[in-house]
Image (spheres, grey):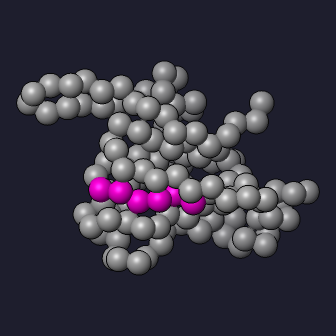
Amino acid sequence: MSLKPDIIQLPKVLDKRGNLSFFEHPRQLPFSIARTYWIYDVPGGETRGGHAFKVQQEFIVALSGSFDVVLHDGEKEQVFSLNRSYYGLYVPQMYWRHMENFSTNSLALIVSDRAYDASDYIRDFVEYKRLKND
């Protein structure tokens, strides 16, 4: 089964004291979480990412502010704008990705199904396209 990138709407518990959203495996996430990290204080005009993972999958949420996640499948590019804390983007393995257009005080939460492994990264786009299209 080939999984595709997808926006996943998260549950919202509405409360006059403040709202709450969450995600769990397997209800909202198609994988168990092995690592969590976040990106913040990104200077205006900067991009983050610029790589693909051979096996790692990710789920990205804009906890605060907004940013775009640009995905490339080896043939075409898709842009996903994240700006609500109750939506997240599922990113399967072997999608080239970078993040851009960070708003002031944006906070990106990323969870993945694997611990950090430098050998899982593909950091050269030409190499990525070669691997993807082989």
Eyeballing the image, is 45 above or below 35? below
Residue at point 48%, 27% (across, down):
28
In terms of image quadrants, where is residue 123?
bottom right
x and y percent of residue 105 in the render? 25, 63
Eyeballing the image, is 87 above or below 43? above
Residue at point 55%, 64% (across, down):
98
User: Is 93 in the magenta?
Assistant: no
Residue at point 51%, 57% (across, down):
69
**Observer-nearest of 73 and 128:** 73
**Observer-nearest of 7 and 133:** 7
Eyeballing the image, is 3 above or below 56? above
**Observer-nearest of 29 and 56:** 29
Residue at point 34%, 44% (across, down):
84
x and y percent of residue 107 in the render? 32, 56
Eyeballing the image, is 54 above or below 45? above
The part of the chain drawn in magenta is 65-70
Q: Quadrant of the N terminus?
A: top right
x and y percent of residue 19 in the render? 20, 31
